[in-house]
Image: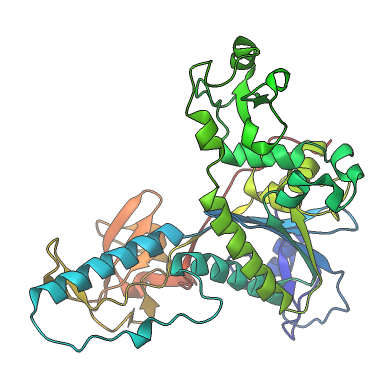
């Protein structure tokens, strides 16, 4: 299992401990639960000396970001998580709001002087869907700094090093002829062609780098002439060009830029600048380096194991036995829209401004012990609050409706994220 974070009586991060030690401290009354996610205890009457620094490793992604706390001295992964972003939800919400406002203006129900000065964007502006990704990572870096003794940060800055792919002399010929040869190009092609064979569309099988115009026909090794193919298609194509093989459109597709990757790279640079402001030493690496480290250590392809493999500082042995990553999903903090609308954009209901009822807020994790009645038993999940005092609790077995607030006990307050635990990795380090 993942280690447990520990705070002393001054709320200073101590060395993380094994879950068995945490259970013993809790049973003996020497510690109390401070936070559920990530699980953290606080010592009641003990102060600990200087803790060994850990390295926080990040693998930023467009949809999911891998997070890992690694002890460089021992190679143990202390804690791991996968953070799922809500960038697409933010984009969809903004498009819906824009449609509602345009509809309202077209109805001419009121007149407002046109305003254009409020459209000026500040320097360094990012789209809200991209900004939300950065804010999520910033939030968890700040939380982990309060709960664990962080000494450095490693992050994957780019998926592939485009300059080194185009010109090996940028940092020496040895870069392309060393152990990393092919890893930058392969990472780019996997991203470009979505890990599928460009000819038959098959996935989940070993793929080979294939020249659309063979070198025997004058084709080059530039990435614009490369694609991915399964072994059967690669052999069947032989010395034909992609057009002669019946795939004339592949050449144009190969020259199409990766817009999604470019957007992600722009957020990574912005994230890099903001992480520098924390004052912690930052190590950066490319996706090719991450894939090389993970492959050399025989690890599975997951977001948190990719994060643990980021950078040149990765230990030769990474101990992953028993680590279950915490799956974190960004859910937001509710809806500020006061009027609920129908499909045509007309208001049909009004939302209350009061979010907290009887000490609870929608989204809190609670444990309800109902003594009798139809809902008798113990229910644990997220609560939906009502002013009447009758709450709904969403559990793993389904929704339990009409539970009185006095039966509920808070477990974890709503913080804009939902939590679940993933499975341990299948492979062990080589």
Q: Report x, y in % for residue 169.
A: 86, 48
Q: Quarter of the image holding residue 371?
A: bottom left
Residue found at the very far front of the displayed protein: 218
Is 1 positioned to the left or the right of 117 in the image?
right
Is 374 positioned to the left or the right of 362 in the image?
left
Taking the spot 71% from the left edge, 39% from the top edge, the residue there is 185
Front one among 21 and 53 = 53
Q: Taking the image as drawn, is residue 41 in sight?
A: no
Q: Taking the image as drawn, is residue 74 in sight?
A: yes
Front one among 201 and 28 = 201
Q: Quarter of the image holding residue 74?
A: bottom right
Q: Is residue 228 above or below residue 155?
A: above
The C terminus, quarter of image: top right
Q: Report x, y in % for residue 410.
A: 46, 72
Q: Report x, y in % for residue 35.
A: 60, 71
Q: What kind of colouring is applied to the model shown?
A: rainbow
């Amino acid at each position: 299992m993942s280690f447990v974070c520990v705070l002393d009586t001054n709320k200073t991060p101590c060395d993380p401990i094994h879950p068995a030690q945490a259970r013993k401290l809790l049973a003996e009354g020497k510690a109390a639960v401070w936070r559920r996610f990530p699980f953290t205890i606080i010592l009641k009457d003990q102060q600990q000396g200087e803790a060994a620094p850990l390295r926080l490793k990040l693998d930023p992604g467009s949809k999911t970001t891998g997070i890992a706390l690694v002890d460089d001295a021992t190679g143990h992964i202390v804690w791991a998580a996968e953070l799922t972003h809500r960038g697409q939800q933010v984009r969809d919400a903004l498009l819906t709001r824009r449609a509602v406002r345009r509809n309202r203006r077209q109805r001419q129900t009121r007149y407002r002087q046109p305003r254009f000065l409020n459209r000026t964007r500040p320097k360094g502006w990012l789209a809200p869907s991209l900004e939300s990704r950065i804010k999520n990572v910033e939030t968890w870096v700040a939380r982990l700094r309060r709960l664990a003794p962080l000494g450095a940060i490693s992050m994957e800055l780019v998926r592939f090093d485009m300059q080194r792919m185009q010109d090996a002399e940028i940092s020496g010929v040895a870069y392309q002829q060393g152990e990393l040869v092919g890893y930058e190009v392969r990472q780019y092609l996997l991203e470009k062609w979505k890990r599928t064979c460009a000819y038959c569309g098959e996935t989940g099988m070993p793929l080979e780098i294939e020249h659309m115009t063979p070198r025997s026909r004058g084709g080059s090794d530039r990435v614009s002439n490369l694609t991915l193919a399964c072994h059967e298609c690669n052999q069947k194509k032989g010395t034909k060009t992609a057009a002669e093989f019946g795939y004339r459109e592949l050449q144009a597709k190969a020259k199409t830029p990766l817009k999604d990757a470019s957007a992600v790279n722009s957020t990574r640079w912005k994230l890099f600048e903001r992480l520098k402001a924390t004052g912690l030493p930052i190590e950066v690496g490319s996706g090719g380096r991450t894939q090389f480290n993970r492959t050399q250590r025989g690890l599975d392809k997951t977001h948190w194991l990719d994060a643990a493999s980021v950078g040149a500082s990765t230990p030769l042995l990474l101990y992953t036995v028993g680590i279950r990553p915490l799956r974190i999903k960004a859910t937001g903090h509710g809806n500020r829209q006061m009027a609920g609308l129908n499909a045509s954009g007309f208001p049909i209901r009004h939302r209350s401004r009061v979010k907290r009822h009887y000490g609870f807020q929608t989204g809190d994790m609670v444990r309800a012990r109902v003594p009798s009645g139809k809902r008798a038993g113990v229910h644990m999940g997220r609560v939906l609050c009502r002013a009447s005092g009758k709450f709904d609790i969403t559990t793993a077995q389904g929704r339990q409706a009409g539970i009185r607030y006095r039966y509920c006990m808070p477990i974890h307050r709503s913080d804009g994220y939902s939590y679940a635990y993933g499975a341990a990795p299948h492979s062990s380090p080589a």
